[in-house]
């Protein structure tokens, strides 16, 4: 399971979601799954942003949703200064955690996150 929590939608985030969507499609036999949660204080207003992301990137295998509140779900303890947090779970255990401050998710970061999906496919 790859969970992507984000506080904004950027081109690099869109690239990440598209590549994770492709990984999910390739690894359906291994039951790989993912979801994206936009952390927002304006859930109604931000819904269109998620629809645009899905259409722009052709997302077919990764559900996109909104959490009402930029702090995120309390049990996940999303870092306050992270614009994007990506958690990889294997079973019930988080085995990989990536956190990117505002503007720090770049092409190298996207590549690193995608490559780290191998950890949950072993």
Image (tube, rainbow, N blue to C red):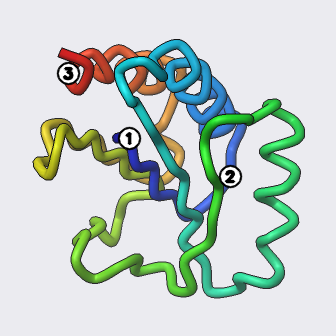
Determine whether, in the image, residue 91 is placed left or right of residue 41. Answer: left
User: Which mark's residue is nearer the viewer, 3 or 2?
Assistant: 3
Quarter of the image containing the C terminus?
A: top left
**Which callout, 3 or 2, points at the residue further toward the start of the chain?**
2
**What kind of element bears circle 2?**
loop
| Mark 1 crowd level (few <14, some 14–19, many ≥20, 10 Å Cα) | many
Q: Nearer the viewer, residue 5 or 93?
A: 93
Residue on which the image places disc 3: 119
Q: Residue at x 51, y 19 (%)?
A: 23
Whole-percent x, y for residue 60 in the image: 73, 35
Residue on which the image places disc 2: 9
Whole-percent x, y for residue 118 in the image: 27, 15
Q: Nearer the viewer, residue 122 or 4?
A: 122
**What kind of element bears circle 1?**
strand
Which disc number belongs to residue 2? 1
**What kind of element bears circle 3?**
helix
| Mark 2 crowd level (few <14, some 14–19, many ≥20, 10 Å Cα) | some
Quarter of the image containing the N terminus?
A: top left
- Tell me where residue 16 sits by quadrant: top right
**Which callout, 1 or 2, points at the residue further toward the start of the chain?**
1
- Between the residue at mark 3 and the residue at mark 2, the CA separation in whole angstroms equals 26 Å
| Mark 3 crowd level (few <14, some 14–19, many ≥20, 10 Å Cα) | few
Q: Residue at x 28, y 21 (%)?
A: 116
- Tell me where residue 38 sits by quadrant: bottom right
Which disc number belongs to residue 90? none
Determine whether, in the image, residue 4 is placed left or right of residue 67. Answer: left
Whole-percent x, y for residue 44 in the image: 80, 84
| In contact (CB < 8 Å): disc 3 and disc 2 | no
Whole-percent x, y for residue 75 in the image: 22, 77
User: Which mark's residue is nearer the viewer, 1 or 2?
Assistant: 1
Q: Is residue 116 above or below residue 48?
A: above
């Amino acid at each position: 399971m790859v969970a992507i929590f984000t506080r904004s939608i950027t081109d690099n985030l869109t690239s990440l979601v598209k590549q994770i969507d492709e990984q999910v499609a390739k690894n359906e036999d291994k039951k790989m799954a993912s979801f994206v949660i936009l952390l927002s204080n304006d859930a109604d207003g931000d819904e269109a942003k998620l629809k645009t992301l899905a259409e722009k990137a052709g997302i077919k295998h990764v559900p996109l949703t909104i959490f009402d509140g930029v702090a995120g779900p309390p049990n996940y303890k999303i870092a306050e200064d992270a614009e994007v947090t990506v958690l990889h779970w294997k079973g019930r255990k988080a085995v990989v955690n990536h956190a990117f401050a505002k503007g720090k998710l770049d092409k190298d970061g996207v590549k690193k996150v995608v490559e780290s999906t191998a950890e949950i496919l072993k």
